Image: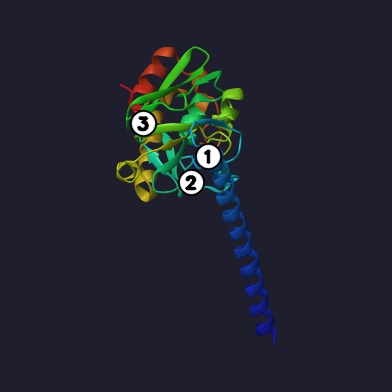
Amino acid sequence: MRAMHLILAILTFAVFIGVGFLIEFIKGRTLSKAILDAVSMDDENPSGNPAYVPPVAVLPGLTGAAPRVEGYALPEALYYHQGHSWVAPQGADTAIVGIDDFAGKLIGSPTSITVPKPGEIFRQGEKGWTISQSDKQVKMVFPVDGKVVAVNEAVLKNPTLIASEPYGRGWLFIIKSRSLQRNLRNLLSGSVARRWMEESATAFRTMFSGKLGIVYQDGGLPEDGLADYISAKEWREITGRLFMIE
């Protein structure tokens, strides 16, 4: 009898957990759809004009639950460019783009961000937007080919979102690309992405080993705003090497 009660308890718990995951999955899909609907090019928007869309979270609550590599959140559902941006495919030819947690923690609280204008076209690996933190800048490269069809107006009003919620409300823009599926093959995911993040963290520690007592918290987790502890020369060195902009 006790065994039966134990089995029922386990099954009830499993159902509860499963329902929770299902709700979060549906929520994430619904929020992403809300963004895409804002820029859809259908009969109600025959001109196909791009848009500045409202601050809707792409991956709500994902950062806290995401696996961490060397202290940096690295959600497994995304594709990563070695210039430290991420891509979330939303169909065969549409993707949402943002920066990863490594870039967010390095930059800290940006003072400004210059993003592409809707309608602009870029190639994979081409410099496309600039993030500034006081006297330091980093020019980020496009992770995929395509045309920018929407920009997240929330990050224009509050650039700190790209660091505080890099996988959520800090997303940057939406791209339409006929080459998306081919471009994704050039990006990183799974165990390859994890190894790459380990290598990025190791390279950073090697470059600035003398300052780790300042820029790393107890336990080795990086603090937000590492740029505050790095000179302008060091900043150019690390961004050139780790953000593929040399």
Q: Which residue was labeled with disc 1? A: 167
Q: Residue 164's quadrant in the figure? A: top right
Label 1: how many Cα within 10 Å (few below 14, some 14–19, many 20+): many
| SS label for mark 3 | helix
Measured in 3D between alpha carbons, the distance from the residue under mark 1 to the one under mark 2, in whole angstroms, is 8 Å
Q: Residue at x 54, y 21 (%)?
A: 110
**Residue 32 visible in the displayed image:** yes
Is residue 246 shown left or right of residue 130?
left
Foreground disc of the pair 1, 2: 1
Q: Nearer the viewer, residue 174 or 2?
A: 174
Please tell me in which quadrant of the rendered image residue 142 appears.
top left
Mark 1 in CB contact with mark 2 (< 8 angstroms)? yes
Q: Is residue 140 above or below residue 46?
A: above
User: Helix, strand, or loop for circle 1?
Assistant: loop
SS at mark 2 in the image: loop
Q: Is residue 215 left or right of residue 145?
A: right
Mark 3 is on which residue type?
A: Ala
Q: Contact, CB < 8 Å: mark 1 with mark 3?
A: no
Q: Quadrant of the C terminus?
A: top left
Q: Where is residue 96 drawn, in percent x and y?
A: 47, 39
Name the residue carrying label 3.
Answer: 203
Q: Nearer the viewer, residue 15 or 176?
A: 176
| Residue carrying label 2 | 75
The disc labelled 2 sits on which kind of residue?
A: Pro
